[in-house]
């Protein structure tokens, strides 16, 4: 089932197509509808929940009169307002990250580069617990930490379905050298990465220190692709906020950087051998 986040993106994309088909600039459409230009932009990019009345007004302005098409848009609007399963964790999940979880839940492909952390979809509960315990920007009690871990483990369900999602992650050697939680926790985490990488829909590459300077230094990013909605999204996370990029020039730049990283990194096979050696030498109790 499509997530509400992705349904909003699909609806926004269709409304943009209709506006452009009606030869209307976003500012002109906003003026005619009594909306702000910002509201039209947020609707078309799927960043806000739509009201049926707003959708009906937009469809009327864009010349949509076919009853079947109107019903289809209204049905899509109603589905896009439904709560996703992750909203049950709203008490511990920042609103800006709820959007990402919704996108992740319906992505067909995720390409990522991580310089500091094991990707969330591959984290063990013990590793995640240590990360949350040191989240100094927001002190979390034990209950909140456990709820966040439960959410993270539930997010990982999508990786277990090869037909639904493929994941290709490039991980800096620094991620794996940093002893988060000590040798036991890291040993479990590294072995988990080895296990996960055996899945047909998962590719993990290690970017070694020996690769030297590279085009993603100082940043992390994820490129999310969708089977049902046109256009990719680049997601970059900061301590208390996130950045979503949808311009094609931004997408192309990140894709180019990711391709360079996969060339600089160890091959998937060599990466697994490297992880086996690391686990044996550094994280064996």
Image (cartoon, rainbow, N blue to C red):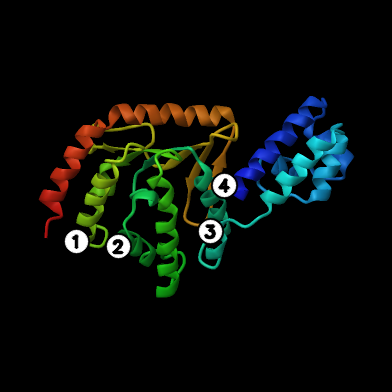
In this rendered view, identify the residue nearer to me: 89 or 31: 89
Where residue 60 sits, quadrant-wise, is top right
Nearer to us: label 2 or label 3: 3
| 276 on left or right of 221 | left
Q: Pointer 3: what residue?
A: 86
* Circle 1/circle 4 CB separation < 8 Å: no
Q: Pointer 4: what residue?
A: 1
200 up-or-down from 96: above or below? above
Q: Secondary structure at mark 2?
A: helix
Q: Secondary structure at mark 1?
A: helix
Q: Secondary structure at mark 4?
A: loop
User: How many residues crowd around disc 4 within 10 Å: few (fewer than 14), some, or many (20 or more)?
Assistant: few
For the residues labelled 2 and 1, the Cα–Cα distance comes to: 9 Å
Q: Pointer 2: what residue?
A: 126
For the residues labelled 4 and 2, the Cα–Cα distance comes to: 30 Å
| 53 on left or right of 198 | right
Q: Secondary structure at mark 3?
A: helix
Residue 49 visible, this orientation: no
For the residues labelled 1 and 3, the Cα–Cα distance comes to: 30 Å
User: Which residue: 48% across, 38% down?
Assistant: 108
257 up-or-down from 84: above or below? above
| 183 on left or right of 29 | left
* Circle 2/circle 1 CB separation < 8 Å: yes
Give percent across and percent down for residue 114.
36, 44
User: How many residues crowd around disc 3 within 10 Å: few (fewer than 14), some, or many (20 or more)?
Assistant: some
């Amino acid at each position: 089932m499509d997530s509400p986040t992705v349904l909003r993106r699909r609806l926004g994309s269709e409304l943009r197509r209709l506006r452009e088909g009606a030869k209307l600039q976003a500012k002109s459409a906003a003026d005619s509808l009594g909306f702000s230009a910002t509201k039209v932009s947020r609707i078309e990019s799927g960043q806000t929940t739509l009201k049926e009345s707003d959708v009906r007004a937009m469809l009327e302005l864009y010349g949509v009169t076919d009853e079947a098409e109107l019903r289809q848009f209204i049905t899509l609007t109603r589905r896009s307002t439904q709560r996703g399963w992750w909203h049950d964790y709203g008490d511990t999940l920042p609103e800006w990250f709820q959007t990402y979880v919704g996108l992740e839940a319906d992505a067909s492909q995720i390409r990522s580069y991580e310089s500091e952390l094991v990707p969330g979809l591959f984290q063990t509960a013990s590793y995640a617990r240590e990360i949350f315990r040191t989240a100094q920007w927001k002190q979390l009690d034990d209950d909140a930490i456990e709820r966040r871990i439960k959410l993270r483990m539930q997010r990982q369900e999508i990786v277990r379905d090869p037909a639904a999602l493929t994941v290709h992650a490039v991980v800096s050697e620094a991620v794996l050298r940093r002893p988060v939680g000590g040798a036991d926790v890291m040993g479990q985490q590294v072995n988990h990465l080895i296990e996960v990488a055996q899945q047909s829909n998962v590719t993990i590459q290690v970017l070694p220190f020996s690769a030297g300077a590279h085009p993603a230094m100082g940043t992390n990013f994820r490129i999310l692709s969708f089977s049902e909605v046109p256009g990719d999204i680049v997601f970059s996370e900061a301590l208390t906020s996130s950045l979503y990029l949808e311009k094609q020039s931004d997408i192309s730049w990140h894709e180019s950087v990711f391709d360079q990283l996969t060339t600089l990194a160890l091959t998937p096979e060599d990466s697994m051998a490297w992880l086996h050696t690391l686990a044996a030498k550094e994280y064996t109790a």
